[in-house]
């Protein structure tokens, strides 16, 4: 029989059951709430992921638009497709991508260009506008907000046409700014380390050494940005504006240097963002946003060699020529620096060293090496490729010169030098010889092996390098014809003898164009011609003459002339006597002399030593050679004058640059034959030559105002020879170009080079200072930011090429005049921005200082951009019938808005597909993602690299 439970037991069981059911219910409710929460979290995460994906899609859209817009596109009518056939080298300053005009900030000087994503979407609520969102998330954009009224979103639709999201981007052009982290040293000490490069693997000098590495003068190369050859350290505010490396530029405010947070030991942190700057310095620094950025791409020391007749892929990055001679010098040479830390010309590569390593100037080996250098410098139409072809790509080693065998590596030369043309075919050899003799330390000119002391050259001299010596400038000859009657004793006998004499007596003018006193070495003037003596129409005697006249040790004062007059006394100067008849008992009938001067050859240096020649000059008469007839009508002396003048003593080695004075200048002068005068009015000894007429307008010749070597003694502004390797690219403008009054023309640019008037600034792309292969932070000369360029040019001193310590004045932004289109060439900066400064400059040296002291700090390769993308995941409520009258910003918003997440109302005009009508859309913003990318565009290849990326969270 089953026992019946009592009431207490039944109650306990019921309570237990209810408890279990309650627990199950709680667990079920907990699971339900957890699931709901997880679903909500998942939904939020999904919305956030959607917004993030939209943001990344926005970056891809911005990048695709930039890449396509900057590519040169052509349309194929056959396939109805577009194709890229090349690449623009231009940054976005030519209207592409719709970049706006400059936005000027507080200082009203720096410019910021930007593009907001073009679209027709418009947010109705101010706090949901693209510009408002951007300014809330970025200190950089906050001050641009008033100018971003046209910034719009583009809407993303699903297949049914509902809004699923929207995105917008802002592209800020940062190319006209300086990378401040490249301007300042990370050293926390008041003085930072000098910028120098060390050899790496395979003796390859890749880039600037780290700030905590130690300079080693035996192997390293440093940039003398203090101007005093110190290799210890430099103060940030003590650098000089020399055009060596970007670290020499001063920053606007010292707080950028000292305000950085302390790092480990003696380091300071880099600046990472504008927000970082505001936080550390406690100020908005609005104007500084438009002066600096905090990133840059890694660039190569190369130029872009474009073959216009070949496909884009045939264009090559080519190595620049190290103008210092450090990179390509013979491996046997020791330290590049002497005991005072100055570059040692003997170890630079520009000067020959013998097998023992000792200096060998003025030897056959040195002469052969200099001539080989001239040939190698103009031998190549292109430099070697920068990359060695390996995978991954590595910079190619620069093969060094082997002096002992006169072996020069392939592609050694400078193509722009080879391309220089002028009035004679060997002009580029002359310019190359001038470059060699500028950069070596001796005073022996580089001349062809055919030049000697003994013989007058039968053809024009190909070249004679300019050295810092007095130059031959004028040869003034007196032709003396004497007839004397001597009575035979006793007096009154009436019996006479007759003496005839023909003498040629030159005076030689040497000019010193340099600003220090110089002394000539041994000098020879060799005059070649023919004389004839006739009587009664019949020849009596004749001979060709080739007579040397020698002198030495003539001191020529700075920027002045000195004349050596040879004596007419034949006991002192026997070379003067061409012919004489002494004590002839019977006089000639109708006697006369005929004389012609066919050539004048001048050489200085060490007499007889063909390896120690300082200057060579040559004049050959035109054919037929003019003959002067001198009738002898009575006793006494007749003097005729013959005068040769150099137009420009720096190019006196060719006949075309001498003038035979064949014009009388009054004073009773007449010319019995062209070039032969009856008075000395044609002589300009100790005065400016008659043909000395520099063009002062700076177009077809250098701009040289008031040059004279007499009276005020003002010389050419470019009269400078360092006798050591160049320390700035500016010095290229001091290299004489082989024609009167012309030096290498850095004031104008031509992509092909050629004659002087076209310009030679292309050479600035093909040369560099030092051996570094890589660099960072160079300024893009295509940027249209006048104040940034003015700051870049400020501090440049142009008083003298060897003045490394004087600081020049500021440059006004208004003096920067933009012209033409952007270019791949850094040398074209002189045409595109500096024309106003060039025109205003007083002389050629000053005009060329701006580009010469800036070119090495420029790179057209890298464009910098900041791209900020705003993406929002959205739910389209319009198709659900949701709308409102009073929006979120109304004082009395519609109640339905309280049930929505960040509601927004805007007008959307669709862009096909799908082709939907314009309508007002009511949406809920589910998630927002803001992303910032600092981007560097390779303008040569139209490739893009994100160098810094971050999400801008609330």
Image (cartoon, rainbow, N blue to C red):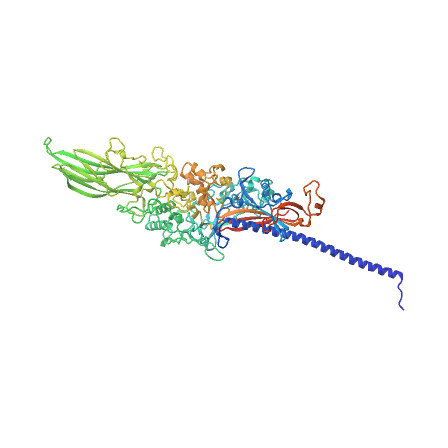
User: Front-most of 391 and 870?
Assistant: 870
Residue 253 against residue 773 in the figure, above or below: above
Horizontal arrangement in the rendering, residue 853 relative to residue 507 (left or right): right
Q: Looking at the image, can residue 213 be seen?
A: no
**Residue drawn at point x = 54 percent, y = 37 percent:** 108
Q: Quadrant of residue 7?
A: bottom right
Can residue 158 be seen in this snapshot? yes
Residue lying furthest bottom: 1
Nearer-the-camera pick, 618 or 287:
287
Q: Residue 828, located in which quarter of the rendered image?
A: top left
Would you identify the image quadrant in which residue 444 lies?
top left
| 400 relative to 879 in the view: left or right | left
Percent from the top left, x then y, of residue 209? 50, 49
In the image, residue 330 lies at what x, y percent? 40, 52
Name the residue nearer the viewer: 729 or 341: 729
Q: Residue at x 28, y 45 (%)?
A: 607
Q: How many marks?
A: 0
Measured from the top left, where is residue 246 in percent x and y? 49, 44
Quarter of the image that includes the N terminus: bottom right
């Amino acid at each position: 029989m089953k026992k019946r439970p009592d009431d207490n037991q039944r109650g306990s069981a019921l309570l237990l059951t209810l408890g279990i059911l309650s627990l199950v219910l709680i667990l079920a409710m907990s699971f339900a709430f957890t699931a709901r929460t997880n679903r909500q979290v998942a939904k939020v995460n999904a919305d956030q992921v959607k917004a993030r994906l939209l943001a990344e899609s926005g970056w891809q859209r911005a990048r695709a638009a930039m890449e396509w817009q900057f590519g040169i596109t052509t349309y194929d009518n056959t396939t109805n497709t577009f194709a890229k056939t090349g690449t623009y080298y231009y940054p976005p300053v030519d209207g592409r991508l719709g970049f706006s005009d400059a936005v000027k900030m507080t200082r009203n000087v720096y410019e910021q260009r930007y593009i907001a994503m073009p679209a027709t979407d418009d947010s109705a609520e101010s706090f949901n506008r693209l510009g408002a969102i951007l300014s809330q998330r970025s200190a950089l954009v906050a001050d641009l907000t008033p100018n971003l009224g046209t910034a719009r979103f583009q809407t993303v639709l699903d297949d049914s046409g509902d809004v699923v999201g929207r995105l917008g981007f802002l592209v800020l052009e940062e190319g006209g700014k300086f990378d401040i982290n490249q301007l300042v040293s990370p050293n926390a000490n008041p003085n930072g380390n000098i910028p120098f490069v060390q050899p790496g693997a395979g003796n390859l000098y890749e880039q600037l050494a780290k700030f905590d590495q130690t300079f080693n003068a035996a192997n390293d190369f440093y940039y003398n940005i203090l101007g005093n050859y110190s290799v210890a350290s430099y103060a940030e505010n003590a650098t000089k504006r020399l055009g060596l490396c970007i670290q020499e530029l001063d920053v606007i405010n010292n707080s950028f240097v000292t305000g950085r947070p302390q790092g480990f030991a003696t380091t300071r942190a880099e600046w990472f963002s504008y927000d970082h700057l505001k936080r550390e310095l406690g100020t908005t620094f609005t104007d500084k946003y438009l002066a600096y950025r905090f990133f840059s791409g890694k660039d190569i020391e190369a130029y872009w060699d474009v073959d216009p007749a070949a496909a884009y892929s045939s264009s090559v990055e080519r190595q620049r020529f190290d103008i210092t001679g450090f990179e390509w010098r013979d491996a046997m040479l020791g330290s590049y620096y002497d005991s005072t830390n100055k570059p040692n010309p003997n170890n630079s590569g520009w000067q020959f060293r013998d097998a023992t390593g000792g200096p060998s100037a003025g030897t056959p080996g040195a002469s052969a090496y200099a001539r080989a250098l001239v040939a190698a410098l103009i031998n190549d139409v292109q430099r070697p490729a920068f990359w060695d072809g390996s995978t991954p790509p590595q910079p190619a080693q620069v093969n060094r010169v082997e002096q002992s065998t006169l072996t020069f590596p392939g592609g050694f030369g400078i193509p722009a030098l080879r391309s220089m043309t002028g009035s004679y075919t060997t002009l580029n050899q002359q310019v190359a010889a001038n470059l060699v003799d500028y950069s070596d330390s001796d005073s022996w000119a580089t001349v062809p092996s055919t030049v000697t002391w003994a013989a007058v050259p039968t053809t024009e001299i190909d070249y004679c390098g300019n050295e810092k010596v007095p130059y031959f400038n004028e040869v003034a000859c007196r032709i003396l014809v004497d007839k004397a009657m001597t009575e035979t004793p006793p007096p009154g006998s009436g019996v006479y003898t007759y003496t005839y004499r023909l003498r040629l007596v030159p005076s030689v003018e040497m000019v010193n164009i340099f600003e220090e006193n110089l002394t000539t070495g041994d000098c020879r003037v060799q005059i070649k011609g023919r004389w004839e003596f006739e009587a009664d129409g019949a020849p009596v005697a004749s001979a060709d003459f080739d007579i040397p006249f020698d002198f030495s040790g003539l001191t020529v004062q700075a920027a002045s002339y000195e004349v050596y007059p040879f004596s007419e006394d034949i006991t002192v100067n026997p070379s003067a006597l061409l012919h004489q008849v002494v004590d002839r008992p019977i006089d000639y009938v109708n006697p006369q002399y005929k004389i012609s001067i066919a050539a004048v050859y001048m050489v200085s240096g060490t007499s007889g030593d063909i390896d120690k020649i300082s200057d060579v000059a040559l004049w050959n008469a035109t054919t037929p050679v003019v003959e002067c007839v001198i009738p002898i009508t009575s006793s006494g002396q007749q003097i005729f004058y013959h005068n040769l003048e150099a137009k420009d003593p720096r190019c006196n080695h060719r006949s075309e640059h001498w003038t035979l004075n064949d014009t009388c200048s009054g004073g009773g002068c007449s010319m019995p034959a062209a070039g032969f005068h009856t008075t000395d009015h044609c002589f300009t000894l100790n005065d400016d030559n008659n043909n000395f007429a520099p063009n002062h307008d700076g177009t077809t010749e250098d701009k040289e105002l008031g040059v004279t070597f007499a009276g005020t003694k003002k010389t050419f502004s470019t009269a400078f020879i360092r006798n050591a390797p160049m320390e700035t690219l500016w010095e290229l403008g001091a290299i004489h170009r082989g024609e009167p009054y012309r030096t290498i023309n850095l004031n104008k640019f031509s992509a092909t080079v050629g004659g002087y008037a076209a310009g030679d600034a292309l050479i600035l792309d093909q040369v560099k200072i030092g051996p570094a292969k890589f660099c960072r932070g160079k300024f893009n000369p295509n940027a249209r930011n006048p104040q940034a360029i003015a700051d870049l040019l400020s501090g440049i001193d142009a008083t003298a090429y060897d003045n490394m310590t004087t600081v020049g004045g500021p440059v006004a932004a208004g003096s920067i005049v933009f012209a033409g289109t952007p270019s791949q060439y850094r040398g074209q900066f002189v045409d595109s921005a500096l024309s106003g400064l060039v025109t205003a400059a007083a002389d050629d040296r000053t005009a060329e200082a701006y580009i010469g002291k800036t070119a090495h700090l420029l790179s057209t390769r890298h464009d910098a951009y900041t791209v900020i993308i705003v993406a929002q995941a959205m739910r389209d409520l319009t198709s659900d019938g949701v709308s409102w009258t009073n929006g979120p910003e109304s004082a009395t918003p519609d109640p339905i808005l309280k049930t929505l997440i960040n509601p927004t109302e805007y007008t959307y005009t669709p862009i096909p597909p799908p082709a939907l009508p314009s309508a007002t859309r009511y949406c809920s913003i589910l998630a927002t993602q803001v992303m910032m990318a600092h981007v560097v565009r390779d303008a040569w290849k139209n490739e893009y690299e994100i160098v810094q990326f971050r999400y801008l969270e609330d």
